[in-house]
Amino acid sequence: MEEQESAAATATDREQGQSQSPQLDPEAEIERPSSAPISGLQHKLIRLPLSRIKGLIKADPEVSLASQEAVFAIGKATELFVEVIAKDAYSYALLGKRKTIQRKDLDNAVDAADEFAFLEGTLE
C-alpha cells in the first residue's frame, strides 16, 4: 500500500515539475546573424591556417574550385587526424619513458593501428 502511495506521489511530483518548467520558445533560441561571415567563426574552431590549406588544395591540378566549407572541413579533418596519431605516438613515447615523440614512436603507432595502414612505408 505504501509503495502505491509513494509511486503516486512521485508521478504527481513529475507532473508538477513539468508544468512548472519553462517551455522552450523557438524564438528565444540564440539568433545567428545570416550576414556574418562563416570564416570568422571557422577561424575560432580550427587551429590550422585556412589560407595554407587552400593553397595545398589549389596545388592539386585535379581540383579547380574549393568552397570555404570544403577548406574548413579538410582542415578540421586534418587537425583531428594529427591529434589522434600524435596521441598514439605519445603513448609509445611514454612506454619508452620519454615525453618527446620521436620518429620510432610514429612508426610504432602506424604499425600497431589498422586505421593508419595507409601510412605504412611513407615515413621512410
Image (tube, grey):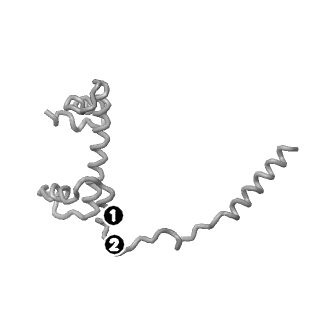
Position of residue 46 measured from the top left corner of the image (x, y, whole percent): 30, 55
Q: Residue tagged by mark 1?
A: 41
State if disc 2 and disc 1 touch (CB < 8 Å).
Answer: yes
Is residue 58 or residue 84 the one in the foreground?
Answer: 84
Query: Mark 1 or mark 2: which comes first in sequence?
Result: 2
Task: Tell me the SS state at disc 1.
Answer: helix
CA gap between label 1 and label 2 equals 9 Å
Position of residue 111 measured from the top left corner of the image (x, y, whole percent): 25, 30
Position of residue 63 measured from the top left corner of the image (x, y, whole percent): 16, 59
Position of residue 48 measured from the top left corner of the image (x, y, whole percent): 24, 53
Residue 19, disc = none
Residue visible at 30% across and 70% down in the picture: 37
Residue visible at 27% across and 27% down in the picture: 98
Q: Is residue 60 above or below residue 83?
A: below
Q: Can you say which quadrant of the picture contains the N terminus?
A: top right
Q: Is residue 37 above or below residue 15?
A: below
Query: From the viewer's perspective, is 18 left or right of 110?
Result: right
Q: Residue furthest bottom?
A: 35
For disc 1, the neighbor class at 10 Å (few under 14, some 14 to 19, many from 20) is few
Q: Residue tagged by mark 2?
A: 36
What residue type is disc 2 on? Ala
